[in-house]
Amino acid sequence: MTKELVSDLSVILPSALLTVLLALFVLTDTYIGRNHRRELLIVCALMFSLIVQNHADLLLQGRYVNIPLRTAVTAFGYILRPVLLVLFCHVVNPGGRFRWAWVLTAANGALYLTAFFSPLAFRISESNHYHGGPLKYTCHAVSAVLLVYLLFLSVRKYRITGRRNNWILLLPVLLIIGSVMMDDSVTFSEPPISFLTMAIVISSIVYYIWLHLQFVQEHENSLWAEQRIQIMKTQIQPHFLFNTLNTIRAVYATDPPLADRTLEKFSKYLRQNLDAMEQPDLIPFSKEIEHTRLYADIEMLRFPHIRMEYRIDDDDFVIPALSVQPLVENAIRHGVRSREEGLVSILSYREEGCHVVEIRDNGVGYDPDAQKQQGEIHIGIENVRGRLEQLCGGSLKVESETGKGTAVTLRIPASAPEAERS
């Protein structure tokens, strides 16, 4: 095996291997939709053929002389590149109509097919030299138009969605532009495959990564939506509804004004639970506290021995909807309800770099380490922890001691995303 062949294979094999691996990833990726999977597999097949075309064109320039075959191989390269750019447009904007782009690509292909009988685009002379015709730059012009359009689609996608990972879409366009410049400027050696082909292979991988991230994000969003519904269901429990209505009915017999006020609070509490499905993931902390007060006031009517204490020194931040109220509900139901004098405290204050919320109770408490060993999980607490981490990079810490009570501490970074104040 000659050094020249080894040198060629050292460039060709990695590109071919990346193309094959990309096809395997696309085939096995459960997040990729059917249409995108089909488009990416077509791209992989065309990329592989482009790699073969590049090397065959190099071989036919000197080592092996076959003018008709070189004409076909050269024309194939000119035809294929715009096709790949149109497919990239489909990947970026799957719902778009690209008839004009396909018509332009078909016209480009028809022009270069004339090389078999006309020098209009190019010809290969009897001495095996390439000679460009009067329309030799048609492929370049068509590709430039498609590349500008691809850039337009990428920028528009980024601006419309506002997702940070959509900046990735700009990378393939920059790679392709840079590779074209390198192909035109690097003249000291003839690579076995062009810089443009390498850029197309890398761009395809970038588009796959972007698509995967998009579908993973959509999957996570659907999971969060399902979780929000489950949270809402847990907040509107049948026994709570039944007990509250019975309490209000009993209070009407002794204190009708109090019963009216409680009924109003109860209806507002239910409405806010229903609104939690429609409102943003992050809401002002003051709104979450208002919702928590409604719940606590209703429970204190049922259990007069329970007191609530609010020390709100910081409320200028946002927090996931239905995060404090479930923790207060846990404190009442599992902590202080069985105490003769139960106390639940909510504190909020600012520490360096974060907002802190504490929910403390003097209830029965429990041993967190023993629960971990037994595999017991507080689903409500874990739901709040997961949403804190996912939506605002926050954290949740539980400290409890049997017979003394429980303290749950939420920490929300001061740099967490903002929400619309309402």
Image (cartoon, rainbow, N blue to C red):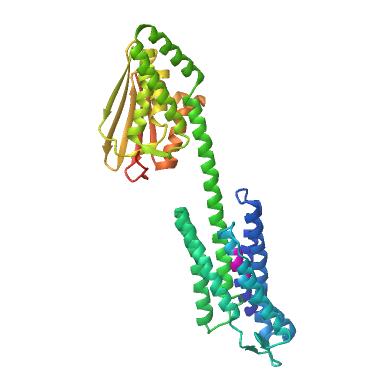
Q: Residue furthest top?
A: 254
User: From where the camera sits, is residue 80 visible?
Assistant: no
Observer-nearest residue: 324 or 338? 324
Tell me the quadrant of the picture where the C terminus can be found: top left
Tell me the quadrant of the picture where the N terminus can be found: bottom right
Image coordinates of residue 201 in percent, x first then y, are 58, 66
Residue at image location 54% in from the left, 48% down from the top: 216
Observer-nearest residue: 260 or 270? 260
User: From where the camera sits, is residue 306 visible?
Assistant: yes
Q: Is residue 35 magenta?
A: no
Tell me if 47 is positioned left or right of 373 in this view: right
User: Residue 311 lies in what quarter of the image?
Assistant: top left
User: Residue 353 lies in what quarter of the image?
Assistant: top left
Q: Is residue 106 above or below residue 416?
A: below
Q: Which residues are magenta?
A: 83-87
Residue at image location 55% in from the left, 44% down from the top: 219
Image coordinates of residue 215 in percent, x first then y, are 56, 49
